[in-house]
Image (cartoon, rainbow, N blue to C red):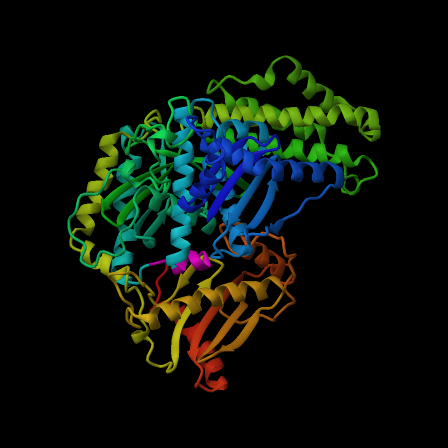
């Protein structure tokens, strides 16, 4: 019994996902009340009826109290978690006891992350985002919602079965020779061949990587290119797995034909009876969506870090080329007019600061930090107009919008404290931000995001060339790689640690992790076998991660506890660039309704590194986590000694050539 819903303040459904049990429950509840011979309401209408009282209640509480509830449990033990992002309300529901409050909140934040990756700065305008999430065209809306549903289901599947998504860090295949050869191949052969071709149509390949299931075989970025953040990389892996899901149950992978992308849509909605269908029904069930062109790129919006600052949600084109089942090549390209996005963000940021200072007036804390430079804003406007050029029509420069700019720019500082004037200028700032997001949408989203209408920047021939080059390189390795991905690291490799059952070590500075394989599927087994013991250990590991996060949220960096026949340890610590362990500090205590600890929801560890680095100015600070499971019969002093030795051994360059 699971559901996730996004709704507007007027209770309009902007997106929904349900599992079959929740759908059947809603249909039984609202379909039974229909008179004989009448069609039951469309499922979306039933959802609207079910959630409307909750949505209206939240809006009323915000309007009258300035606050709302974050979660509640109903009499039938259904857990509800709610979070408001601007004017969009996210509601996650669980009625089978399989997900706790933290799980539901994490699902909400991950869904928000995926929407940011797909829609970029349009997320900064609630009005525009509502139109993007709920297009007027029914077929387009059906395709979009199925796409978002597939991403959500893929993430849930990976988090339930994959250790890298459990701790939200990227796992790399450990094979020094092959990894080095592949990185060199990407650098010296593949990217030069693509970027020197006339068929790239103005695009430049910035990043390329090879995935084996969810594990990273090789990753290469062009020189002077921004590093891809761990959060963005994990989101891209989710998207790749949604397009080409891995069949990890397959023990002996053979040369099977890769299914087309349209067969990989993860919509769990069960078939419904013909009496439930109607041509006029606005439902995901009643329409067939045209399959997307597998050669068309997906527009994604990723974080870019440059010398002059950090630019979130910059447009890229993502190309996924399946090499063999379970092995995928991903290319990320810079599009020709990407400089426009930087100008839009810079200008948006300037108007957001201006709006804040106008709201606070001369007496607010922002005023104490100095007045904004009007000439700087005017300079940003000139750069913005120049960056736009002939790429798209700019409604920003027409009519009343231009009047708004001039009014804001040339008001004297002294007038800003005037409540009457500020009340006029603040709506103008909001209007400007909406129009800027509209320019961004027109340049980067209109007809360029998904589906068969998406332009093919890299020509099909060039994409096929890239695919053929990598296939030729890995032809003799493909079967080995598929097996290696299931047995990347085994406990047999660590005979110096008797009593150690399992461990996970994470380098939070790079967003990468190391752990022994723990694949428990119907057709595969781990070192622990395929019976109850393996399932038991797996459950303990997932529970340990959840417990460690709960303590970390309360400010604890070390956790040791005994659970029956096992002894669990969790450590978080900081080192400098030379590997010297730095002094411990009191970690910040987070409120219960804060974003869940991790990387995909909100990058907790990046904030933690910034927090710690304040006391180590000018020094490179790295953050590590280690989770271990020992047999309970091992003396405590040996367990702690094992943890220290294991942490130092795992990151030896000879063992783990990550780059």
Residue 577 seen:
no
Q: Residue 582 occupies which quadrant of the picture?
A: bottom right
Q: Residue 51 occupies which quadrant of the picture?
A: top right
Q: Considering the image in quadrants, where does the C terminus appear?
A: bottom left
> Measured from the top left, where is residue 20 in percent x and y?
40, 44
> Measured from the top left, where is residue 470 in percent x and y?
22, 46
Residue 51 lies, with reference to residue 140, above or below; the image says: below
For the point 25% across and 31% down, the residue is: 460
Viewer-side residue, 228 vs 264: 264
> Measured from the top left, where is residue 499 in percent x and y?
39, 81
Q: How many marks?
A: 0
Residue farthest front in this picture: 36
In the rendered image, residue 164 lying in the magenta stretch gets the answer: yes
Residue 429 lies, with reference to residue 302, above or below; the image says: above
In the rendered image, residue 96 lying in the magenta stretch gets the answer: no
Residue bounds of the magenta highlight: 163-172
The answer to whether residue 568 is left or right of residue 379 is left
For the point 74% across and 25% down, the residue is: 425
The answer to whether residue 398 is left or right of residue 509 is right
Viewer-side residue, 318 vs 368: 318
Residue 110 seen:
yes
Residue 53 lies, with reference to residue 499, above or below; the image says: above
């Amino acid at each position: 019994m699971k559901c996730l819903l996004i709704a507007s303040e007027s209770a309009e459904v902007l997106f929904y996902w349900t599992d079959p049990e929740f759908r059947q429950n809603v249909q039984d509840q609202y379909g039974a009340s229909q008179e004989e011979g009448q069609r039951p309401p469309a499922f979306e209408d039933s959802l609207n009826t079910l959630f409307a009282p909750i949505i209206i209640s939240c809006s009323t509480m915000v309007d009258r109290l300035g606050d709302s509830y974050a979660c509640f449990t109903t009499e039938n033990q259904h857990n509800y978690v709610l979070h408001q992002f601007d004017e969009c309300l996210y509601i996650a529901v669980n009625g089978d006891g399989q997900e706790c409050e933290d799980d539901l909140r994490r699902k909400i934040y991950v869904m928000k992350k995926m929407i940011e990756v797909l829609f970029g700065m349009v997320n900064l305008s609630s009005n525009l985002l509502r139109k993007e999430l709920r297009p007027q065209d029914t077929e387009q809306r059906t395709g979009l919602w199925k796409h978002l549903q597939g991403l959500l289901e893929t993430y849930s599947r990976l988090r339930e079965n994959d250790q890298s998504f459990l701790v939200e860090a990227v796992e790399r295949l450990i094979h020094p020779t092959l990894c080095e050869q592949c990185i060199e191949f990407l650098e010296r052969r593949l990217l030069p061949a693509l970027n020197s071709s006339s068929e790239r149509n103005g695009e430049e390949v910035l990043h390329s990587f090879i995935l084996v299931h969810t594990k990273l075989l090789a990753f290469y970025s062009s020189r002077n290119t921004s590093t891809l953040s761990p959060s963005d990389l994990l989101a891209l892996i989710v998207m790749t797995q949604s397009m080409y899901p891995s069949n990890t149950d397959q023990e002996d992978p053979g040369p099977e034909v890769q299914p087309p992308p349209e067969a990989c849509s993860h919509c769990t909605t069960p078939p419904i009876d013909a009496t439930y269908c109607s041509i006029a029904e606005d439902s995901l069930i009643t329409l067939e969506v045209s399959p997307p062109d597998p050669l068309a790129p997906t527009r994604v919006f990723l974080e870019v870090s440059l010398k002059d600052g950090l630019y979130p949600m910059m447009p890229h084109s993502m190309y996924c080329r399946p090499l063999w089942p379970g092995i995928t090549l991903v290319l990320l390209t810079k599009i020709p007019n990407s400089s426009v996005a930087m100008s839009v963000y810079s200008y948006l940021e300037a108007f957001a600061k201006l709006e804040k200072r106008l709201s606070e007036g001369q007496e607010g804390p922002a005023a104490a930090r100095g007045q904004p430079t009007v000439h700087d804003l005017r300079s940003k406007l000139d750069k913005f107009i120049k960056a736009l050029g002939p790429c798209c029509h700019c409604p920003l420069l027409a009519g009343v919008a231009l009047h708004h700019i001039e009014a804001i720019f040339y008001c004297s500082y002294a007038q800003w404290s005037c409540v009457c004037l500020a009340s006029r200028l603040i709506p103008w700032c909001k209007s400007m931000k909406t129009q800027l997001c509209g320019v961004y949408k027109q340049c980067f989203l209109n007809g360029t995001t998904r589906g068969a209408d998406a332009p093919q920047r890299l020509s099909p021939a060039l994409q096929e060339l890239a695919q053929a080059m990598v296939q030729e390189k890995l032809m003799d390795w493909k079967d080995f790689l598929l097996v290696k991905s299931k047995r990347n690291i085994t406990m047999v490799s660590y005979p110096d640690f008797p009593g150690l059952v399992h461990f996970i070590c994470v380098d939070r500075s790079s967003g990468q992790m190391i752990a022994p394989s723990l694949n428990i599927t119907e057709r595969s087994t781990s070192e622990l076998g395929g019976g109850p013991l393996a399932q038991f250990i797996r459950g303990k590991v997932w529970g340990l991660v959840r417990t460690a996060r709960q303590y970390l949220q309360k400010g604890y960096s070390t956790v040791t506890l005994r659970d029956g026949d096992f002894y669990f340890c969790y450590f978080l610590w900081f080192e400098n660039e030379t590997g010297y362990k730095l002094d411990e500090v009191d970690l910040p205590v987070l409120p219960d309704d804060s974003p869940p600890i991790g990387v995909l929801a909100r990058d907790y560890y990046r904030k933690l590194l910034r927090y710690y680095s304040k006391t180590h100015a000018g020094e490179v600070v790295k953050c590590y986590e280690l989770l271990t499971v020992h047999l309970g019969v091992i003396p405590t002093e040996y367990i702690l000694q094992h943890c220290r030795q294991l942490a130092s051994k795992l990151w030896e360059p000879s063992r783990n050539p990550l780059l």
